[in-house]
Image: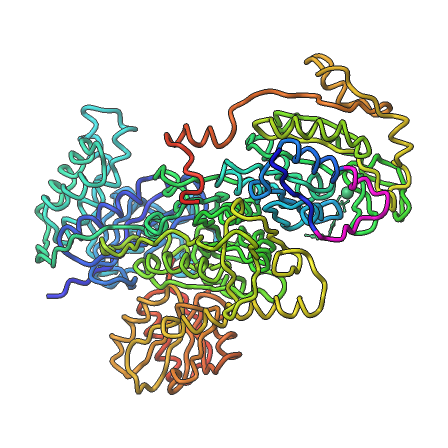
Amino acid sequence: MKVDLSLAIGGFQGGGIESAGQIALRAFVLKGYEVFGSREFHSNIIGAHSYYHIRVGGKALRLPLDALIALDAESIFTHLQSLSKEALLICDQYSLTTKASEIPSMSKALKRRIEQNYGDLSLNKILTDQELKIVALPMRDLLKELSHERSMISVSKALNVMGISAGLYLLGLNKETIKKAIEGQFSNPGINLKAMEIAIEKVKDLERKELPDGKKEDKLILSGNEAVAMAKISSGLDFLSFYPITPATDETLFIEKSGKIITVQAEDEISAIGMALGASLAGLRASTSTSGPGFSLMNEMVSFAVQAEIPIVITLWMRSSPSTGIATRTSQQDLLHAIFSGHGDTPKVVIASGDHSEAIEDTARAFELAEKFQIPVIHLLDKFIASAITTVDKNAFRTLPKRDFSENSDGYLRYKITEDGISPFLPIGRATMIVSSLEHDEYGSATEDPVDREKMILKRIKKLEKASEVLSEESYSVYGDHEPEITIVSFGSTKNAIMEAIEELKIPIKFVQLRILSPFPDLSKELVGKVLVIESNAGQLSFLLKVHCRVDGTAKKLNARPIYVDEVVKAIKAFMNGEKEVIMSEGV
Amino acid sequence: MKGFDYKTDAWIQWCPGCGNYGILTALRNAIAEVEIDPKKLVIVSGIGCSSRIVYYIRGSNVHTIHGRAIPVASGIKLANPDLMVIVAGGDGDLLGIGAGHFVALGRRNIDLKVLIHDNAVYGLTKGQAGPTLPSAVKLRAMNYPNSHEALNPLLLAFASGYTFIARAFAYHVKPLKDLIKEVLMHRGSAVIDILQPCVTYNDLMTRDWFEKRIYYLDSLPNESELLQKMKEVDRIPLGVFYKIEKETFDQKINSIMGRKNKGVRNV
Ligand SMILES: Cc1ncc(C[n+]2csc(CCOP(=O)(O)OP(=O)(O)O)c2C)c(N)n1
Ligand SMILES: [Mg+2]
């Protein structure tokens, strides 16, 4: 029996939703299942609705939900329409008497939609003719039981553990597994273990089916931010400068915490990249991380890095734009921004990863490419990957050799013209030189001579052509059928949802997943049948593919939520029925 | 004498009589007297007439972009603390577009020496008002009198936490050279505001104008007179205003992280 579950736990931000989600992930991993957990939250510190969506038995998110653990009424209202017909709903008794209009934190837009669909009714009225399996727990009484030793306020923090314990138990995990997961989550699990006992005791007589054991593997459970941070450390990162911004900060703080790497919080993103470029010039392996707004500020420095030929890895965690947009939600809106960043002819590499394992692989590759070609490499990731948690192979991490500085320092020419355009690199402090943002001669002295200028621009372009040759094979992955009716082209975090959708559809479909977007690979031989682009923006990859090849239709995700398998299935079907533009709107 | 050669074969592009020549000579002489190996000498500049200085002194130099010399220099110094890293740039570069970095450097106390070529104009873009130009002044190339108040670089440096703050005059080459030597010996963020007449665009603050106003401080001002000395405008004091020893940024990072700065390994 293949176990395949989609569940969510929701509550208010600050209410331990993330811990509860992680307990669930741990528990299913302990049981031997593949897991994928995604965290959705508001740009708010405390109070707004937040939830954790967990997929068991796959690496992509699916809707509808088989189970919802709702720690408050808002969670039920929010996810009401995402529940499968007979979904398990675990909630607080008290929530059921609540009306949407009584919840101050809930958005006006959602209240309006609920009112339109159901009228302003309390939940028990709305839920009466539904076939959901509702388990309404007397949460206050349960907390009182727990509060023998402590104050009500301190035990109320264990509400999340009560909810998730009851949920996991009813979904078929045994007490021992849940206990281990809780112990793994908290350094001091005492009160939480008691909360678990109380919750399970309350539901133990309800109908449940014990889940079979899966295949146990010794893997790491990591968020995307952590995966990239660890990959940078393992790659031998020496220097990281950053300015705090969601969803990049968790990566940088993880690296800072490791204590092994010079980590500087800069005064802004211009300085963050400027310091990293300085450190790189002095011979260190250097990087900075940011998201759209910060990368906008870095643009002039990207152009400088190209012109002055300085290796740098910029990790760009895309979030929902334009402007401040929805700071804590996902998107793929910075594709063109990354590719066309920096004024002037600015050859650079842009890499995109489809999941955690690829993000780890690409991090090392980004350093290799940046250092070999002495160019900026922009590593595109997004908020979805940043905060999603899944399992990763323990030996996925590579180490890289030190940068090579074997060139003779006598008569050193920083911008020596060579056949492949690559001039041997010596760090600042090892030879006299000028590293220059002005057009320069081979030494680095400023020049406006037309012949010098032409040579230098061709030299910089040649490096990208070389990169293109080196990368050609690795610029994209091809999955699925090789004589298909349609070819899907995509990049980044849409990958696993697309793969699963193709598996489910059982029609011959080819999937070209782009890993390198600059230099843009030649896809002319790969595009067979009708071409559908799938992306989480208003058509940026479509635009590129139209310029380079051809496109017949685009499926877009614009609501700042992750992509779900079932909406991809629908989008492909719609495309095959002749629709040229499909908007995928799932997710809350 | 090690006899290092700091000359380059670049043709110097500054206007005849430009104050930058005085700064160039003073800096080159100071470096020669301290005998810094050109390979270990790192001059980092932004963009402007003054920032061209990186082409005129042989070193391991970096010409960055407008206003951003300080971040790049900071990265270099943190990566390799053995280098002598000097930041040079205009008043527009360091106190206009790059003002945020100027403040941040003071707060960090990284061992960088900042030379402000202060001509009160944007020289390279042909004479617009610079951040240190007094208000209501209308210079040759300006359409209207200056509607901004002048920024006082010394007060900004003091408020930001610089541990060495001085002012000099570009045409007084020997005192400037001696001051630069002193700054080269200082450990921490240091700044010299160098008054530098722009012979082409600043037709008010000429050599003559400065020479009527400048005078040298007899000694380091004490705490009670420091701010008043920094604020003086009718007569313009030159010399060292403020100088203290304080833990530098890399020392702090190292003690927080409980390790020695790795700097550039294998270099
Ligand atoms: C981002 C950016 N904006 C504007 C410019 C144009 N620009 C070049 S130099 C300069 C000002 C120079 O003034 P200052 O820094 O005081 O140097 P000076 O020429 O007076 O020595 C400006 C505005 C530029 N190069 N980059
Ligand atoms: Mg100026």
Say which residue appears at 43% left-offset and 57% top-offset.
A330
Taking the magenta stretch, the answer to whether it contains residue A526 is no
Residue A360 drawn at (x, y percent): 33, 57
Q: Which residues make up the magenta segment?
A: B9-22
Specify the quadrant that holds the C terminus of chain A.
Answer: bottom left
Picture colour scheme: rainbow
Image check: A181 left or right of A575? left
A230 or A180, which is in the foreground? A230
Q: Where is residue B14 in the image (x, y as percent from the top left)?
A: 80, 48
Q: Is A295 left, or right, of A100 in this rendering? A: right
Instruction: Report the front residue among A228 and A488.
Output: A228
Q: Quadrant of residue A417?
A: bottom right
Taking the image as four quarters, which one is ligand 2 found in?
A: top right
Instruction: Locate residue A227 relative to residue A534 in the image: left or right.
Output: left
- Name the quadrant of the N terminus of chain A: bottom left
Q: Taking A480 as reference, is A399 above or below it?
A: above
Frontmost residue, A66 versus B213: B213
Please name the residue shown 32% across and 52% down the image.
A227
List x then y, in percent, for residue A107. Answer: 45, 50
Answer whether residue A523 is visible to the viewer in this image. Answer: yes
Give the residue displayed 28% in from the left and 60% down from the top.
Answer: A83
Specify the quadrant of the image occupied by residue B145. top right
Residue A139 location (% of width, % of height): 23, 38
Most common secondary structure along the magenta stretch: loop
